[in-house]
Image (cartoon, rainbow, N blue to C red):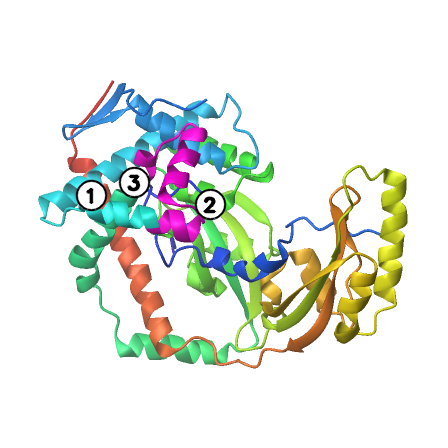
Amino acid sequence: MQMCVSSAAAMAMALPLLAGAAQAQVATQGSDAFNLPEDISFIVERSNPNERRATARVNGSIITGTDVDHRVALFVAAQESEISPEQMPALRLQVLRNLIDETLKVQEAANLDMAVTQADVDQSYERYAVQARGMSVEQMNEYLYSIGSSPRTIKRQIQGELAWDRLLQRNVRPFVNVSEGEVTELWERLEASRGTTEYRVGEIYLAATPANRAQVQANANQIIEQLREGGSFIAYARQFSEATSAIQGGDLGWLRLEQLQQPTLEAAVAQMTPGQLVGPLEIPGGYSILLLIDQRQIGMPDPRDAVLSLKQISYTFGPGTTPEQAETQAAAFVEAVEGMNGCGDADARASAVGASTVNNDEIAVRALPEALQTVLLQLNVGETTPPFGDLQEGIRVLMLCGRDDPTDTSGPSVDQIMAQLEDERINRRAQRYLRDLRRDAVIDYN
């Protein structure tokens, strides 16, 4: 089954616009107190928003060259790797398609007396700035200008997302039904499959027809290349995936292989390991790029769901410290750590060598960088990780002060199963809805 459905108007940035999006990112917030890097190494000019150049006219509404420029800038700013000049034309073309889809959604909502007001957009924009980005509206505006974008481009995306949500709530969701028998049958199959593997998959789906299949495949190969060079999967999914899951950064959630309902996808996921990227995979209707985010055993506790009590012990080198001095100080720090007798003894001993400590009593193993997860799961209370960091910025260790192992093995509830089945059917209808809007639109390109 094609698990993703068309929603090309999703965010290009690596954070959600609206509350409830991108669950994978929420899981990492518990580690903020430690400000941990994702890569763990152990040790022994402003664009003019008033400029307008017409690019396309969609049922009379103009999309300008500046609109495209600002959206491209937003996307590029979210990437860890640079977009090559050769890839830029394809990116601009996809951005234009996304803007056309957004325009069609906004127009359809207005035609059906469900228009999104400016007050709705401004409120969501402020919430995004404060909650997702940790900025005031003024700071968010300034940041967008600094990267060559503008507040208008995000507000346009918000307007498109709100409009589409209203359309689906009124014109699609009420006509989707899932019977109790279907839910019961799936629940029974899940119970019978306890102990088997469940996968959390990210997907970028690109629709293709016989006429444009070669070009779509070429675009998919370019996306794969950028992702392997460090591009953000979430950002690419939001910008390129023609799926409603795009708003969650392509995250399909937890599922079993048979729920993919595509032999090609099932075979690929079964061979993947967490963090692996594969594709593009040709499936009926287009191409899929898959990322295995995680995997677990159904109905069985996962050690990575354990909640830890940790103490971070850090030593920062002062300005002007030479490499030789840093090595000496680091050795003294490591010696002090090795002499600590558990968490109760750590604060005093750390202070004696000029180190600082930070406590976090409720941090899930999953919220930590993968390299630390493996190490911490092997520690006993009172033991520390190997030192990590570097001789320029400073070094630190994590001491395990306590651990609460997971006990919940109940699996998804009946309500969760019903919601999943409903979402799958809504997604399929939503794809047809957007295709109808595209087919009926009058679009003039400049």
**Residue 436 position in % (x across, y down):** 19, 42
Q: Which residue: 55% across, 62% down?
A: 30
Instruction: Say above or below: 389 vs 78.
Output: below
Amino acid type indicated by mark 1 = Gln
Nearer-N-terminus badge (2/1): 2
Residue under numbered circle 2: 14
Q: Quadrant of the N terminus?
A: bottom left
Magenta run includes residue 275? no
Nearer-N-terminus badge (3/1): 1
Residue under numbered circle 3: 155
Nearer-N-terminus badge (3/2): 2
User: Cβ–Cβ below 8 Å for labels 3 and 1?
Assistant: no
User: Cβ–Cβ below 8 Å for labels 2 and 1?
Assistant: no
Residue under numbered circle 1: 118
Q: Which residue: 10% across, 43% down?
A: 111
How far apart, in angstroms, are the residues tagged by discs 3 and 1? 9 Å
Quick one: label 3, few (<14), some, or many (20+) residues within 10 Å? some
For the residue labelled by badge 1, is the local secondary structure a helix, a strand or a loop? helix
Instruction: Say above or below: 121 vs 428.
Output: above
How far apart, in angstroms, are the residues tagged by discs 2 and 1? 24 Å
Foreground of the two, 39 or 424: 39
* Residues drawn in magenta: 127-155
For the residue labelled by badge 3, is the local secondary structure a helix, a strand or a loop? helix
**Residue 182 position in % (x across, y down):** 31, 74
